[in-house]
Image (tube, rainbow, N blue to C red):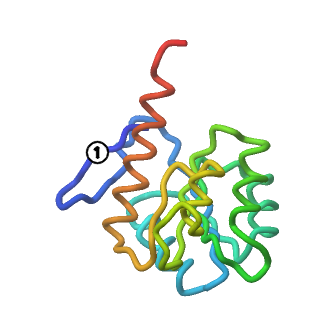
Amino acid sequence: MAWVAVGRGDWRAAELENIMPSVLVVDDNELARNLIANPLTEVGFSVETAAGGFEALEKFKASHHQMVITDILMADGEGIDLIRSLLADTPDLPIVAVSADPRTNETSSLGMAAKMGARKTLSKPFSALELLAVVGALLATEDEAQAQPA
């Protein structure tokens, strides 16, 4: 799968393969889940959502998504625990951590997520274009890494 920029920073999949990327979106807030999932669906991603970490682990085990986008501060447990669990089983999984935590240092929720292995972080609120740019850039990096000879 290749990723190309279309217009004003909008990332879309160039269908070079028949497989559309599958993304698991995790947030305990339904509105936030939809604000993340809808733009991804509109540009062709296959998106599944989960309302918390436990549900996310079950859905990931059943479907093995190509990427996970997770909130960090959730009612049923920290997104940090979800990141730790996912990466224990799938160390190369691209994870994007999102949070409304206003702190910007390495002890913030996003700083901790990055330390735990989240490849990208986004501070809420963010635009659909910001989300798509981060996801597209991360998947393009993954494609390049897979194309490199061992």
- Pinpoint residue 58: horizontal percent, then vertical percent: 82, 61
Q: Amino acid at mark 1?
A: Val
81 to 38, vertically: above or below: above
As helix, strand or loop, the secondary structure at mark 1 comes to strand
Say which residue appears at 60% left-offset and 71% top-offset: 71
Q: How many tags in the picture?
A: 1
Which residue position holds label 1?
4
83 to 26, vertically: above or below: above
119 to 38, vertically: above or below: above
- Pinpoint residue 131: horizontal percent, then vertical percent: 40, 64
The outermost residue toward the top is 150
Q: Quick one: label 1, few (<14), some, or many (20+) residues within 10 Å? A: some
- Pinpoint residue 38: horizontal percent, then vertical percent: 46, 73
Q: Is residue 36 left or right of residue 61?
A: left
Q: Is residue 148 left or right of residue 10?
A: right
Q: Quadrant of the C terminus?
A: top right
Say which residue appears at 48% left-offset and 36% top-offset: 142
Q: 55 or 53: which is nearer to us?
A: 53
Say which residue appears at 34% left-offset and 53% top-offset: 12
Q: 85 or 11: which is nearer to us?
A: 85
- Pinpoint residue 135: horizontal percent, then vertical percent: 43, 54
Q: Quadrant of the N terminus?
A: top left
